[in-house]
Amino acid sequence: MAEDADKPETMEEDEEQSASSDEAEDFEEETPEEEKPKGRKISNPLGIILNTRMLRRVVQIIFLIGINAYFFAALWGQEVITQFWGGFRDILSTLPIISPLEAEFAILAGSFDTLQREFTSGIFPFFTIGAMVIILTIIGRSACAWVCPMGTIQDFASLPKREKIRPSPGTEKELRRLKTYILALVMFFTIWISISVALGTGDVLKNAMNIFADAPFDPFNPAYILFVLLPAQDWPTSFDNLWLLGTWGAVIWLQVAFVALVVILSYWFPRWFCRWICPAGWLYGLFSRDSLIGIGRNPARCTPDVCNTCEVVCPMNIRIRRFPYQHMHSADCIMCLDCKSHCPNKAIEIRFS
Ligand code: SF4
Ligand code: SF4
Ligand code: SF4
């Protein structure tokens, strides 16, 4: 399959990367005219539309709709579609994404969402943990790139913007710590509730925890807000009952504002919620770092001193050139393959280890 070789978006670069860009420009200037490619050779014209990035967009849209497949049955009576997705759920009901199963139309749940719910119900999530670990150790965080609805929404929000903002490595590192703290807090409350349930005092604690009782991350979980809270509100059906929006309450409006922030900021900061906030992503990264299938660079093709295209296009802002050629063991890599699609030397390879 021919890869799309569009020019990458130019991001605000840190000093080192700017230097590399300058070097890349110098390199271009020094390249003898006869050695420069005369034009882009398209071995397979269909490659313009049939490429990895396009395939990922299609899969993302299918899952974004499919995750809420019961919607089809409710709206148009499309039982065939819901049966197809129901079959998918019967094989694997949880995936390492964020997606609440109690969403009215949902057929798939996120492992992290399910973990919290099972713990707070007094159940030890053997199956959920087992499935999560197996998936992550085989295909890494691919589900983040190809399936997760919040990843999809952020990706599409960032598509129109060509010039992305990339914080300096130090700032990026500090911002990434946020999700660690959030995960620690979420797990603390989840296990506290779990122990209380086991001791028979769970009801009292759950009443006190209020909206945090079933899954402590839910109030900040954009997928929960979008697929559970918003559909449960009273929606106006005409101008005459617009006043229904006034019945929504302050908390839900704050949550709607948070989801809007996730989408709007993604325009400038690709996948900022994944990179800095999502505790599920951090948990998944623990098991995906040494996944069987990963990304590596071919040292015979890679020219890291004069090129940084892979880092410019990486939605997770990973400093790819700092990793060993053989296998990029990064907990943040979501296997989106954007680096592979854009690498001018076709140096990025999928590796099995
Ligand atoms: S890190 Fe992003 S893609 Fe992965 S589960 Fe979280 S929101 Fe979804
Ligand atoms: S992997 Fe490709 S894009 Fe990245 S530094 Fe090497 S040649 Fe450049
Ligand atoms: S390193 Fe490559 S595959 Fe991994 S997240 Fe970045 S662009 Fe995607």
Image (cartoon, rainbow, N blue to C red):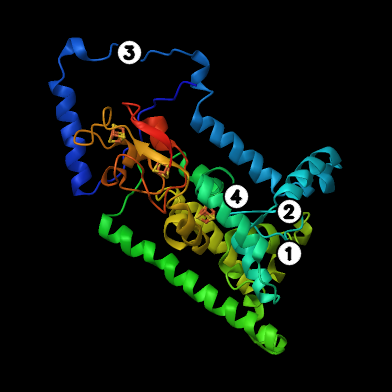
- The verdict on label 4 being within 8 Å of ligand 1 is yes
Q: If you read the primary sequence from the N terminus, does the residue marked by circle 4 or circle 2 appear first?
A: 2
- Amino acid carrying label 4: it is Pro
Establish whether ligand 2 lies closer than 8 Å to the Cβ of label 3. Answer: no
Marks 2 and 3, the one that precedes in the sequence: 3
Q: Position of residue 199 (x, y in %)?
A: 68, 88
Mark 3 → mark 1, Cα distance in angstroms: 55 Å
The numbered dot on residue 149 is 4
- Compute the Cα span from label 3 to label 4: 38 Å
Depth check: give the residue in front, 181 or 302.
Answer: 302
| Residue under label 3 | 39
Q: Is residue 215 visible?
A: yes
Where disc 4 sits, the SS reads helix
Label 2 amino acid? Ala
In the image, taking residue 12 as reference, residue 201 lies left or right, namely right
Earlier in the chain: of badge 1 and badge 4, it is 4
Circles 1 and 4 in contact, beta carbons < 8 Å: no
Amino acid of disc 1 = Gln
Rendered position, 205 above or below 109: below
Query: Disc 1 designates what residue?
Result: 233
Q: Residues within 10 Å of mark 2 (few under 14, many from 20)?
A: many
Residue type, numbered disc 3: Gly
Query: Residue at label 2?
Result: 106
114 sits to left or right of 174? right
Q: Does the CB distance between marks 4 and 2 fall below 8 Å?
A: no
Graded by Cα atoms within 10 Å as few (under 14), some (14 to 19) or many (20 or more), the crowding at tag 3 reads few
Q: Mark 3 vs mark 1: which is more N-terminal?
A: 3
Give the residue displayed 17% in from the left and 12% down from the top.
Answer: 33
